[in-house]
Amino acid sequence: MNPEQLLQSAAAIALLAVVICAIGEWLHLRRIGRIERLAFGDEGPQLWTRTAPFLRTIAVALLAGGLWILAHLESKAPEIDPDKEPSQHLLIALDVSPSMYLEDAGPNRNFRRGARASDVLEALFQRLDMTRTRVSVVAFYTEAMPVVLESFDINVVRNVLNALPMEHAFPPGQTQLQMGVEEALKYAKPWPKSSATLVVVSDGDTVTGALPRQLPISIADVLVVGVGDPYKGSPVAGRTSRQNKQALERLAARLKGRYHDGNTKHLPSNIVRSLSMAVPSIQDQTFLRDLAVAATGIGGTIIALLPIFLARFGSRRKVAIIPA
């Protein structure tokens, strides 16, 4: 159950608690109305005591909603069954050409392009439910080849993005981005309909090429992430390289997806949440747990202290203490 569904169900439980508590308070007010003079004298109770029914009702609602959320939040990460058939796939087409090692990425232009891409994708990795998601990586330079296929261990993917010098596995030459995308899409063909998200990571420093006219039916979302300075070039292999923003935008349009300039900006939350495979992040779960604990604490405190305040400060009449 995601946070939005959990909040909706908690609100329904709290509303039910309000209705039940309101009926009880109404019956209680009818009962004590008959003995009000006997209990409080002609002066009656303190004015603030008239808020007691509302305070109790609010406290019960906070307790009910908070305890419902705490009871349904997962206390630990679910175990991953490697043999279980996945329902979602993340497919990454990763540019590993020498230009991806240039240090002109990030807000201060001091990150490698590949390292910056890893940082940008981390927001997506945190939203994966690895109990039902498998991750595949197809690396490309002058050719394309699979590096990771249907892995359930996201740390393996992180290592591929950060640590492996994969450009040495390819003959030198011009980067073939379209070949990498086409090779990645081949692996997506057998997957179920709308079960995969394709993420293309590149600086766009590539030669032109043909793309498939139609995406496999398994592809639900496409995200093209550009890295590298799009304005100032850096020298590599006797030439100048910069992020070809226009080429990446055209690629995203041809794939019916979205382009994001990840050189200085992380993935916006609305883009991550809109992906079909995204699930609530750890931060969302933590915030919801803190909110539930606060609601439970406030409600419990009101329920515990209200009778004491009513007994001590609820009456206008002074009670005389007769010594024994």
Image (cartoon, rainbow, N blue to C red):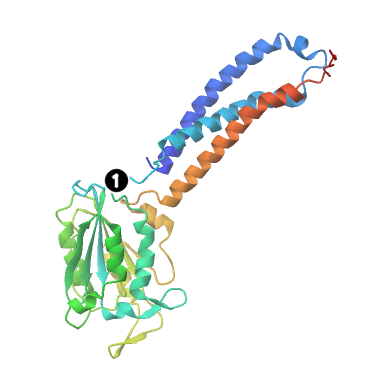
Residue pictured at 67% horizontal, 23% vertical: 307
Residue 10 pos. (x, y %): 46, 34
Q: Could you say which is closer to the camera, residue 259 or residue 191? A: 191
Residue pictured at 44% horizontal, 46% vertical: 285
Above or below, 156 against 228 in this view is above
Q: Could you say which is closer to the camera, residue 259 or residue 15? A: 15
Q: Quadrant of residue 150?
A: bottom left
Tell whether 241 sits left or right of 18.
left
Amino acid carrying mark 1 in the image: Glu
Residue 293 in view (yes/no): yes
Above or below, 86 against 37 in this view is below
Quadrant in which the C terminus is drawn: top right
Residue 83 pos. (x, y %): 18, 47
Residue pictured at 40% horizontal, 62% vertical: 267
Tell whether 262 sits left or right of 220.
right
Residue neighbourhood size for the residue with mark 1, other residues' Cα within 10 Å, grouped as few (<14), some (14–19), many (≥20): few
Q: Secondary structure at mark 1?
A: loop
Extreme residue in the front direction? 324
Q: Could you say which is closer to the camera, residue 293 or residue 1? A: 293
Above or below, 130 against 68 in this view is below
Residue 157 pos. (x, y %): 28, 63
Residue 244 pos. (x, y %): 33, 77
Query: What is the count of numbered marks?
Result: 1
Residue 245 in view (yes/no): no
Tell whether 41 sits left or right of 206.
right
Q: Quadrant of residue 39?
A: top right
Quadrant in which the N terminus is drawn: top left
Q: Which residue is mark 1?
A: 79
